[in-house]
Amino acid sequence: MLSKRFRLKPLNLRQRLLLTALLWIGGLIFAAGITVPTIVNNYLVDNAKSQLHNVINEISSSLTFDDQGTPTLQQNVSDPRFNQPYSGHYWAVSVEDKTLLSNSLLNIGFKTKNRFFQKIVGPNNEKLITVHKRVTIPKYDVTLDITVGIDEDPIEDAVIDLTEWLMTILLTLFAGLMGLIFLQISWSLKPLSKLQKELKALDSGTKEKLSAHYPEEIKPLISDLNSLLFHYSELLERARNHAGNLSHSLKTPLSVLKNQVSELPSKHRDELSTTVVQLQERIDYHLSRVRVAGAINILSVKSNPSERVEAMTKAFDKIYVDKNLILSNELADDLFVAVEVTDLDEMLGNLIENSYKWGQSLIRIHAVIESTQVKLIVEDDGDGINHDKLNEIVKRGIRLDETMPGTGLGLNIVAEMAHSYRGTLDFDHSPMGGLKATLTLNLSR
C-alpha cells in the first residue's frame, strides 16, 4: 500500500530532457571544478620543486670546506629571499655532525612535524615544499645532504583564488548552457504542444482533422491519424446507412408475410408465426449490432446520463403505469460520459427497462466516480437472480424467465456496446434485494 501511495509521477519529455542535460552538464562542471584546480596545484608544486633543484645545484657548486671540514658558501644564493629572516625560503646543508643554514633560518633549522610522517616545517611552523638531495663533492671527497624548502601558503592562496574565479566562470557557463538547452527543448517540443491543442479541439468537436503544418519527422504520424479518423467515420457512416437501407427494405416484406400468415388456417398460422417472430428477432439483433460500432466523432462524443434517465423515466412510467414504480435518479446534472447520446440511451434504456420489468416498488440509479471512469449503477428491489446465473444473462438469446416478453438480446447488446466504448457491464446482488447492474464508462474529458 505504501509503495502505491508514494509512487513517483512519471516525468514528461521536457522534464526528462532537462534532467538528462542537468545531470550531464552538472557532472562535467563539477568534474572541471575539481580537476582543474588540482592540475594547477600539481603544476605549481612541480614547478617550485624544479626551482628548488636549481637552488641545490647552485649551493653545491658554491660550497667550500675549511681545514676542520666546516662547510661554507663562497657566495650567497642568487635569490635574496634565502637571506631574509623567516622569508619562507630556506636551505640547510648537513655533513657528518656539522650543519650550514641559510640566513633566513637564523640558526634555528628545520623542524619536523608528525612523528609518523616526519613532515618538515619552517621555523614558524610553515608548511613547506621541500627537496632533499645527497650530493658528493669529489674535490673535497665529501658526501653531504642538502635540503631546500619554500613556504607552500602562497601556492595554496593562488590555487584558491584561481578556484574561486574558475567556479564563477563555470557556474555562469552552467546557467547559460541550461538556459540555452531549456529554450532549445521548448522550441523543439513546440510541435507536440500544438498537436496536444489540436487533439483537444478534436475532443471538443471543433475540428474534424489535424492540420498538416508539422516538422517532417511528425508529418507521417499526423497523416496516419487523419487517415484513421476519416476511414473510421466513413466506415461507420456507411455501415449505418446500409443498416438503415436493410431495415427499410425488410420492413415491407415482413409486413406482407405477417399479413399472409394471419390469413392461414390456425394450424399452419401458429407454426409460421413462430418462424416469422424468430426472423424478426434475428433482424433486430443484427441491426442493433451495427450501432455498437460507436460514434462518428469518437473523440468528441459526450452525453449527460442524468438527463437521459429523466427522459426515459417519463416514457417507462407510461408503459409500466400499472406497477406504480418509483425511480430515484441520483445522478449529478454535471456528470458527462464519453458516449454518444443514442448509444447511451440504448444501454441505459435496456437496464432501466429490465428493472421496470422485475422491480417491485423502487428503482435506484446512482454513480460512483473512479479516476477517469464512472460506474452507473441501476438496481431494483425485485426478486434478483441466483449467483450462479449472473454471468449468463449477458449471453445472446438467454432469457431466464420465458413468461416475460423479450428476445434475450438486450443485455447482450448493452455489454457489447459498453465494450466498444472501452467500458464494462457487470451484475451483482443489490442491497435492495433485486439485481444490481453496473455500467462502467469513461468520463468525458
Image: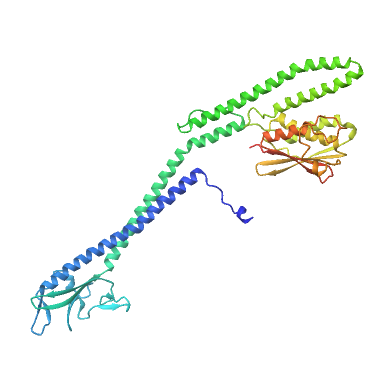
Q: Residue at x 30, y 65 (%)?
A: 156
Q: Residue at x 87, y 39 (%)?
A: 361
Q: Residue 161 occupies which quadrant of the picture?
A: bottom left
Q: Is residue 322 left or right of residue 32?
A: right
Q: Residue 405: image x %, image y %?
A: 85, 30
Task: Say if residue 379 shows up in the picture.
Answer: yes
Please say if 85 is above or below 36. Answer: below
Q: Is residue 377 left or right of residue 142?
A: right
Q: Residue 31 occupies which quadrant of the picture?
A: bottom left
Quadrant including the C terminus: top right
In the displayed image of the protein, which residue is found farthest to the right? 266
Please say if 243 is above or below 161. Answer: above
Q: Residue at x 46, y 40 (%)?
A: 186
Task: Say if residue 77 shows up in the picture.
Answer: no
Q: Is residue 110 left or right of residue 221?
A: left
Q: Residue 194: image x %, image y %?
A: 51, 34
Q: Residue 238: image x %, image y %?
A: 65, 21
